[in-house]
Image (cartoon, rainbow, N blue to C red):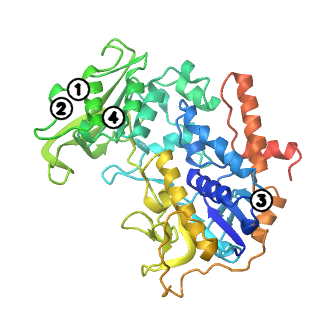
Amino acid sequence: MHPVKLAIVGGGPSAFYVASRLLSLLPRNDSSSSFIRVHMFDRVWAPHGLVRYGVAPDHPEVKNCTHKFDATALDPRFRFFGNVNIGCNGPFSMPSPLSIPLSSLVSNYTHLLFATGCPLPALHPAIPPSRHCIPALSFVHWYTRHPSRPPPPALDSFTHLTLIGNGNVSLDIARILLTNPSVLEKYDLPEQVLDVLSRSAIKHVSIIGRRGPLQAAFSNKELRELMNLPEASMVPIDPSVLVPPDGVTLTRQQRRTLELLQKGSQQASGKTPKSWSLEFYRSPTSLTSSSPASPTDMSQLILAHTRVDPVTGRAVPTGETSTLSTSVVVTSLGFRAEPTATFLDPSVNHLRTRAGRILSASGTTIPNVYASGWAANGAKGVLASTMMDAYAVADTILSDITPGPERIQTTAASEYFSNVDSADIMMNPQPHPENPPKEVVQGINDGTVTQYKDWRAVDAEEIRRGEVLGKERERMNWEDAKAFLASHGRG
């Protein structure tokens, strides 16, 4: 087996699952696979991507996968480098302490994997971001203390919040806003966030979906959690909305969804200090607010009434409209790739791939260059599906690096095309066997670039600080972490 030195761009679940699979199938004590190195780069200083910066704080069990990631990081063939931005320098890129060109990886590694996810929010064309309309991702990044540092929402001035989109992220946000902060204190929520939540004036949350309950994007688990809140009740849904169309055979999940919606919330409507509603068959067309605006002004959200086309399954307008008065609108419509991402296919909003391999602009396969997770497939699926995709991509890499009689029998590998565009990248077949790019080495020396041992120290300190406060952990931002590491002998 020829020496393999793999660079992974991205430090989220997909990246770690690929690394874990590769290293576990190429054990250290096997002489035929003794030389493999995996170097992971993330623009954020802390690893784990959406597991750290996307999972709802009151769902700590979802973050148990980090134990597997920690085990992967203990392998001496693995290294993590945080605070390193690779290649993306467009207006949508999040500033990182160190930015290096993609060519630095091409010249230093034999293989390259993009596991960069879809880091930007999908926006609604009719209601762009404004003072009265914010992306859900900004809200999530606020309560997870993401390094992008979105400002805290003015919850003390908002009485009514409207969510556009009815996926699990929407229900996460609704649940956090409708839960008493005293219940949330034990979870992984920063003290600054709890302080804002304690001053919240939110009384009602509207959740808007352009199609009906049979097409709802939320899971029944998330719906049950919202329905069981002790201090918030659901506004009853018009029974006619919950009648399935003639001739439609319901899945088990759809039947259960309708049953839950028909039953309603645990607390009776009108008997709780807060409330929420699911508004089906509605699509926003405009949002207007008073001018000059003040924090307590109510905006007017115009909603087109819709129906589901039985042939296409798409929402189509009926011609009717209605107006909803709301303090603020939060758009929760999914995620998209950065428009400046290398190898982006704008038509599908993810990288150009085939079976985990990156394609050139002309559709040919680029040797030794791969993509996994949302970067390869778009923003869809949960952690379990991300893991399965990552394992398949890892198997593809293995089939390429162990040819002939040494080939590991995993998933079938497609053949490379012979006419690779000359303008496309070609990895270095004989890089330095151990070293990361020289810019990264300098970043480690000056305390800018983090390694996994730094993260483990910060992780332990966050947990210690949380224990003092009687909670899961108390998160640090980069400045806090850098000061802590410097005071404990780093750099």
Residue at left offset 63%, top offset 66%:
86
Numbered badge on residue 452: none
Asked if the residue under mark 1 is in contact with the one under mark 3, i.e. CB atoms within 8 Å, the reply is no
Q: CA distance from mark 4 to mark 2?
A: 15 Å
Considering the numbered disc 4 on the image, is that residue within a helix, a strand or a loop? strand
User: Residue 393, how many percent across, how many down?
Assistant: 53, 62
2 vs 3, front mark: 3
3 vs 1, front mark: 3
Q: Residues within 10 Å of mark 4 (few under 14, many from 20)?
A: many
Q: CA distance from mark 2 to mark 3?
A: 61 Å
Q: Is residue 307 left or right of residue 207?
A: left
Numbered badge on residue 237: 1
Considering the numbered disc 3 on the image, is that residue within a helix, a strand or a loop? loop
Numbered badge on residue 207: 4
Res. 295 visible in picture:
no
Pick the front one: 432 or 333 = 432
Q: Who comes first in sequence, dot 3 or dot 4?
A: 3
Q: CA distance from mark 1 to mark 4?
A: 12 Å
Q: CA distance from mark 3 to mark 1?
A: 61 Å
Q: CA distance from mark 3 to mark 4?
A: 54 Å
Residue identifier under label 3: 29
User: Residue 43, how many percent across, how many down?
Assistant: 64, 57
Q: Who comes first in sequence, dot 4 or dot 2?
A: 4
Pick the front one: 194 or 378 = 378
Considering the numbered disc 2 on the image, is that residue within a helix, a strand or a loop? helix
Numbered badge on residue 241: 2
Q: CA distance from mark 1 to mark 2?
A: 7 Å
